[in-house]
Amino acid sequence: MLSKYNHLLANLVIFANVALLTDALNELASEGHRIDPEAVAALSPYMTQHLVRFGLYHMDRTRRPKPLTYQVAFEPETVQEEGEEGNEAVEEARQA
């Protein structure tokens, strides 16, 4: 049972890190920076330096998470607003 919990926790950390990295990359692109796909490919989603293993964490159950953005804009002019626009582009790419 502990093994399944550890896998779930690792997957949650990776998922949260990917969401944060995507937001950070899109913010850089919106500021006019060019995002190099090779550099993005070298990023690891399993970063744990920011975690405190036995720390105290406050969970705000009333806070709603913001919508996920699934697209990273590699060219500054392709940056889209958060939300459904990015998700539609991902779906179109999957269907192609």
Image (spheres, rainbow, N blue to C red):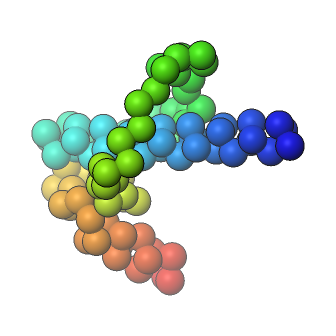
In the image, what residue occupies the spot 65% across and 39% down? Answer: 9
Query: Percent x, y for residue 3?
Result: 84, 38
Residue 69 seen anywhere in this rendered image of the structure: no
* Quadrant showing the N terminus: top right
In the image, what residue occupies the spot 22% across and 41% down? Answer: 27
Query: Percent x, y for residue 36?
Result: 37, 39
The outermost residue toward the bottom is 95
- The image shows residue 4, relative to residue 6, as above or below, that is below
Task: Locate residue 63 relative to residue 39 in the image: left or right.
Answer: left
Q: Nearer the viewer, residue 6 or 83?
A: 6
In the image, what residue occupies the spot 50% across and 83% down? Answer: 95
Choose top left, top right, bottom left or bottom right for residue 71.
bottom left
Task: Locate residue 46 relative to residue 26 in the image: left or right.
Answer: right
Q: Nearer the viewer, residue 35 or 86?
A: 86
Query: Percent x, y for residue 78?
Result: 22, 59
Task: Locate residue 54 relative to residue 18 in the image: left or right.
Answer: right
